[in-house]
Image: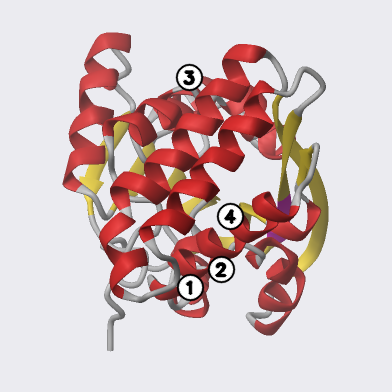
């Protein structure tokens, strides 16, 4: 039975604008050695398509198929595709739990920041393996909060991250999921598994302000009603957690390094 897909982060304009800044060179550097012209690639959980279109440029004349559960994200991706005049990409709405592709279609299945949002990542990975060609490559990149550095730390920030974790868990996600790549791939029979880690950095004043705004929107706008309904926080406590993000952002020596676990494996 298919599992309902939910996206823990929400779909505010701020969040989508953040996604549009992602590039293959930055967020997908770990998979670059495995991409070459002529390959057929699936980008699962493609969001607004900025990484997808970079992949399409690299594998041309190969074909890229891109899927996301959100119709809003796919609309944004198609708009960006028209702006960049990239022909070798097909964007569709769909679920990672039931991919609308035949067995053995793809040379590479790429999933950036997808699995840690899913209630049933095991089912998604089984689908990835099904649609891969023999010897095909799967490539994941997911968050692992245990490796994050938000400097300077404080008890208030620790409490803020506890709330963020509760929101993710409520929607079926796991902000520490990246550490589970190796056992997940082994359980599905993948081989030649390579694990790596990298960071998304937020150190300049502009970067810090952007990530502060991102998490404040996540807490105080996108998931405010949920947080209060579940009685995880009072209104005053929620305000204090947002203020803790303000204090962190204002600190002249502050930065945020978001840990990402990466995995490459062969079918």
Look at mark 4 in the image and give the residue it sits on: 160
Residue 253, given in percent of the width and then of the height, sits at: 82, 22
Q: Residue at x 35, y 43 (%)?
A: 66
232 vs 196, nearest the viewer: 232
- Kindly indicate whether the residue at mark 1 contacts the one at mark 2 (C-beta within 8 angstroms): yes
Quarter of the rendering containing residue 35: top right
- Mark 1: give few (<14), some (14-19) or many (20+) Cα within 10 Å: some
Secondary element at image label 2? loop
Q: Earlier in the sequence, mark 1 or mark 4?
A: 4
Residue highlighted by disc 2: 174
In the rendered image, residue 188, in percent from the top left (x then y), is placed at 63, 80
Q: Which residue is mark 1?
A: 169
Give left or right: position of 162 versus 32: left
Magenta: main secondary structure: strand
Judge from the rendering whether residue 262 lies leftward or rightward of residue 124; answer left or right. Answer: right
Q: Earlier in the sequence, mark 2 or mark 3?
A: 3
The residue range painted magenta reads 261-265
Name the residue at 54% across, 39% down.
243
Q: Earlier in the sequence, mark 2 or mark 1?
A: 1
For label 3, the residue is 57
């Amino acid at each position: 039975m298919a599992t309902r897909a939910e996206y823990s982060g929400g779909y505010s304009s701020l969040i989508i604008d953040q996604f549009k800044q992602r590039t293959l060179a930055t967020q997908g550097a770990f998979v670059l050695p495995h991409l070459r012209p002529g390959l057929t690639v699936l980008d699962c959980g493609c969001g607004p398509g900025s990484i997808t279109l970079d992949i399409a440029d690299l594998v041309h004349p190969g074909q890229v198929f891109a899927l996301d559960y959100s119709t809003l994200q796919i609309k944004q991706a198609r708009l960006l595709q028209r702006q960049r005049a990239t022909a070798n990409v097909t964007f569709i709405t769909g679920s990672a739990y039931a991919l609308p592709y035949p067995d053995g279609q793809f040379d590479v299945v790429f999933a950036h920041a997808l699995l840690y949002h899913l209630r049933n990542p095991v089912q998604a990975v089984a689908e990835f393996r099904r649609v891969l060609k023999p010897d095909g490559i799967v490539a994941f990149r997911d968050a692992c909060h245990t490796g994050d550095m938000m400097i300077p730390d404080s008890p208030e920030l620790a409490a803020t991250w506890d709330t963020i974790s509760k929101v993710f868990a409520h929607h079926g996600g796991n902000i520490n999921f990246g550490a589970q790549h190796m056992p997940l791939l082994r359980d599905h029979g993948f081989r030649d598994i390579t694990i790596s880690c990298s960071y998304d950095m937020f150190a300049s004043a502009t970067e810090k302000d952007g990530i502060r705004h991102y998490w404040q929107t996540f807490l105080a706008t996108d998931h405010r009603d949920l947080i209060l309904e579940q009685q995880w926080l009072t209104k005053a406590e929620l305000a204090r957690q947002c203020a803790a993000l303000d204090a962190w952002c204002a600190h002249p020596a502050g930065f945020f390094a978001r840990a990402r676990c990466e995995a490459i494996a062969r079918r």
